[in-house]
Image (spheres, grey):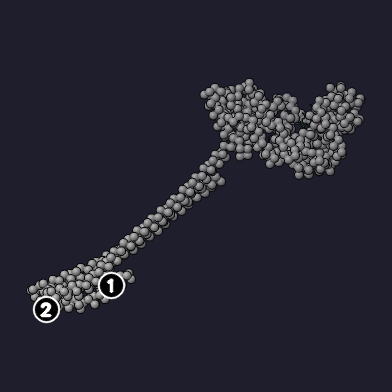
Amino acid sequence: MNQGSQHLGMGARIGIGFILVLILMVALGATGLRYVAEANERLKNIAQNNNVKTELATQMHSALRERALSMHTLPILGDAFEKDLEIQHFNSQGIVYIEARERLGRMPLSPEEARILKYIRELTVEAHPKVQKVVEMSMFTDDQAKIFELIRSVAMPRQRAIADQVSALLDLQRQQTAAAVRAAENSYVGVRNLMLGLGSSALLIGIAIAGYVSRRVAGQALQLANQAMYDPLTGLANRSLLHDRIEREIERSRRSGVSFGVALMDLDRFKEVNDTLGHNVGDELLREVGRRLKHTIRAEDTVARLGGDEYVVVIHGLEPEGVPVIAEKVLAALDDPFHWQNQSIDLGASLGISLYPSQCADASGLIRCADIAMYVAKRSGKGYAVYAPDQVHTNRSDLSLKSELREAILSNQLCLYYQPQINHRSQRVVGLEALIRWHHPQRGFLGPDSFIPLAEEAGLIGPLTQWVLKTALKQLAVLRREGHALTMAVNLSARNLHDMSLPGSVEALLAECGVPPEHLTLEITESAVMSNPSDGLTILTALDRMGVTLSIDDFGTGYSSLAYLKRLPVDELKIDKSFVMDMEANDNDAVIVRSTIDLAHNLGLKVVAEGVESRDAWDTLSILGCDTSQGFFMGRPMPVDKLQTWLRDSTLSPILAGAIYAL
Ligand code: C2E
Ligand code: MG
Ligand code: MG
């Protein structure tokens, strides 16, 4: 719609631009033509007037000549009749002269012409009686010599003076005509230059408009092509360009026999980061991942983003034996932590690879196969997996798992295992953590990692948490009635901290099961707290006011600081098992465990360690002042019946003896 209106705008602008140029050209043409017509008209007037004036002056000139001839003829004519005829001719030429002169006097004259004509008139007035006298003498006297003498000395000089002036008039008129023609020519040249100048300006404007418009159109076309082919966030190829590139690789591979691979990468913790730190940071991370991938691969390979946190790399010339090297290289691109403000963020990824030629024959098939392999990689936690045909159902199973989960909550396929938490000082069990399991009718026994993320995606985490809370609290009530003074820890998911009804329902369940609030611990991962700081804080505050114990789970794996957590109403920290398990072998982890315990105590928080798998770990934690621990060394998560045996045994002897028994 937007692009459509842009096109319309551009079309309209082109049209308007060219109409303007056209109008300009038409206006120019009209102005130029009018100008030339005016110049023509002026020239015509000048030419016509001058022609008439020249004609009249010429008439005067020839009349003078005729009269001079008559003057010379008269004395030599003997016959009176012939003389008479000659006199008549002489007089008629005089009339011709006078008429011509008078008509000339009425014409539009230049000042110079008027002056000359006036002078001619004066000369004529002065010459007339003298010439007349000579003519009369020729009539009555036969003394030819005297008459000719008079003609030569009196009449002719005057006649000549008049003729000279008439000639001067004719010259002037010639000059005026020439000047008028020159002026007309000049004005033609002026008009021509003006027309040429304005015409070329219009042309230039036209060319400029055309250039501007075509550049804009080309720019927009490029932009549209980019939009159609590239992911706006990262600038990487998008799904449709990816399809093109894969199809091209297939063509190339068919001709040359060189195989290639399609690697689909899914970031492991992106959703969490996005929920926790916000979309802007999430977007920046996605861009950075794109940049790193581009740096990792060769120029001839393609990196595309499918959307969300999924990337695809098309690797030219990839053979099955080359997969480990490439996969490690691509995954290594994410090894360096990402930095945001002063925090460093670790993003893992899972990579699924499909190869061509194989069972995946076309672009969509290759992407689908890589997707299936990626799920296998995610499940196995091995980082990457190559597509094998028997993985076909893995991906689809997620879909069915989601719908089956809905059913499972209602039909009691879910159950809780309980892991004991032991106090270091008393060496007695003080609490239990409820950990969910799924007895799937077909797939068997499933751990929470394989379905909790699906429950979150499917929007089922609310009912699931309700079920866990209710079951765990009922169980706790039973155990407490049996005389076990225990607390019960239940895990919350990030999504639960978006649910403002949670405190109300927790309160109702506590009341329903008859459990005092301080016997319930709710565990939230540190990233979950930060995913929704305002709602999260409201919910945690309400739970805290109720008297429920709040615990930060998996502490140390996220990016929150203790200083930040201090502002939250939490009572307890659970050090992530990865630090505890490696504590003996890895000094860094030992330092983290030690300083976490110290800092937490300084902030008035209790510390729980998870993942205690050995006596050494237990002892070290005791020395470091850890309050409570849980782990396989003391007790694995177990179903209710086993738990009851375990609890009975643990009350009989201190926990460490029991732990060895449990292992
Ligand atoms: P978590 O809350 O950190 O739970 C501790 C996990 O560490 C449990 O895994 C437990 O079996 C395991 N663990 C305990 N001691 C040891 C040990 O010594 N060594 C080793 N290697 N592991 C130990 P589990 O039961 O697979 O649970 C995994 C995660 O699933 C839990 O981590 C928790 O985040 C989540 N989860 C479990 N139940 C629920 C639930 O009801 N609701 C929600 N939202 N999440 C749950
Ligand atoms: Mg937990
Ligand atoms: Mg944990």
Q: Residue at x 89, y 23 (%)?
A: 657
- The amino acid at mark 1 is Leu
Counting from the top left corner in percent of width and height, residue 196 is at 40, 53
Q: Which residue is mark 1?
A: 117
Q: Is mark 1 within 8 Å of ligand 1?
A: no
Q: Secondary structure at mark 2?
A: helix
Location of the C terminus by quadrant is top right
Counting from the top left corner in percent of width and height, residue 241 is at 57, 34
Q: Residue at x 60, y 24 (%)?
A: 318
Q: Which residue is mark 2?
A: 140
Q: In the image, 84: left or right of 183? A: left
In the image, is residue 114 above or below residue 457? below
Location of the N terminus by quadrant is top right
The quadrant holding residue 555 is: top right
Q: Secondary structure at mark 1?
A: helix
The quadrant holding residue 257 is: top right
The earlier-in-sequence mark between 2 and 1 is 1
- The amino acid at mark 2 is Phe
Counting from the top left corner in percent of width and height, residue 100 is at 23, 71
The quadrant holding residue 538 is: top right
Q: In the image, 198: left or right of 612? A: left
Crowd around label 1: few <14 · some 14–19 · many ≥20 (10 Å): many
Q: Is residue 236 visible?
A: yes
Q: Residue at x 42, y 54 (%)?
A: 197
